[in-house]
Amino acid sequence: MDVRPPCRYRGRFAPSPTGPLHLGSLIAAVGSFADARHQNGVWLVRIEDTDQQRAVAGADSLILKTLEAFGLYWDEAISYQSQRSALYQAALERLYQDRRCYPCACTRREIASRGRPGPEGPIYPGSCRRGLPPGRQGRSTRLRVDCAELSVRDAIHGLYSQALAAEVGDFVLRRADGFYAYQLAVVVDDGEQGITHVVRGADLLASTPRQIYLQRCLGLPQPAYAHLPLVLDAHGRKLSKSLASAPVDPGDPLPRLVQVWSLLGQPLPEEPPANVSEFWQQAIASWSLTQAPRGPIPIASTGDFGTQPF
Ligand code: GLU
């Protein structure tokens, strides 16, 4: 794989086209854009549609239209993971050559019955690590995780450590249905696109040690990470499907933009902006990643979001 020479700042927003942009993804888009622009960086948009079963037709163009309505303009051609399989395959071949990964015959049911429970479901018990059992065929590909503890310094959360082998175990790079796993695709793309700063939702903080481990296996540079807060409902739960998936209205972006900005702990522009472009002209200079709240944002405390579709 060609790795681009490091540039001062290359950020990205990487939505999965499973539906229109919602509040949580708008927060990630605004935060990653503001951080890139504040540092005079480049900001890319990558459509993460490796999982064609989850991709919804037309969701990508809806997302892009909404980003434009919010003044979130990207710098280079949009990339689509569905068109980048050759890169993922090449990375997988390299990992096979280096004996970092192996074919796995186990079904979900087998893993559920033999694996210890872990934070993200049963931990793979290593059944195929030393070779496929006789008579069994490989279904998926797994990365061999030989790393007891991996730590990352997150710009918002500080030091985050994970006992990678014990808590996560050997994880999937290519799924039994043939799709490349998110962890592989995101690491290959961030490397190939020369991403230096990853600003995204806190639901992905627990994936970050896996991604760093994979970067090391592939000899890729490690970007800086910042994980923006998630939005919770009045009961402290991750937003209910209905509210979480309520589409952001691209028709009247300014009030929403102002609300998201204050949810991110940022001071509102002194002069009330007349439109989105005026908002950004004032807002970019004052952006501060370290002002973003660490904990989840309870939606009820923001009052005006209420329980109405955002
Ligand atoms: N595609 C992921 C999502 O929509 C984001 C991946 C990332 O930013 O690394 O949740």
Image (cartoon, helix red, strand yellow):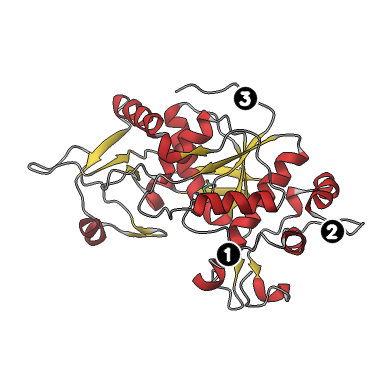
Left/right placement of residue 132 relative to residue 32 reads left
Precedes in sequence: disc 2 or disc 1: 1
Q: Residue at x 91, y 57 (%)?
A: 270
Left/right placement of residue 100 relative to residue 9 reads left
The residue singled out by tag 1 in the image is 247
Alpha carbon of mark 3 to alpha carbon of mark 1: how far? 36 Å
- Residue 223 figure quarter: top right
x and y, in percent, of residue 300 in the image: 67, 76
Q: Residue at x 21, y 47 (%)?
A: 127
Q: Against 142, is 244 above or below? A: below
Q: Against 192, is 34 above or below? A: below
x and y, in percent, of residue 188 in the image: 46, 33
Left/right placement of residue 84 relative to residue 198 reads left
Tag 1, which secondary structure?
Answer: loop
The residue singled out by tag 2 in the image is 268
* Number of the front mark, 3 or 1: 1
Residue type at mark 3 is: Pro
The residue singled out by tag 3 in the image is 6
Can you say which quadrant of the picture contains the C terminus? Answer: bottom right
* Number of the front mark, 2 or 1: 1
Alpha carbon of mark 2 to alpha carbon of mark 1: how far? 24 Å
Q: Residues within 10 Å of mark 2 (few under 14, many from 20)?
A: some
State the mark number for residue 282: none
Residue type at mark 1 is: Pro
Respond yes or no on whether mark 2 lies under 8 Å from ligand 1: no
**Residue nearer the viewer, 228 or 57:** 57
User: In the rendered image, is residue 114 in sight?
Assistant: yes
Tag 2, which secondary structure?
Answer: loop
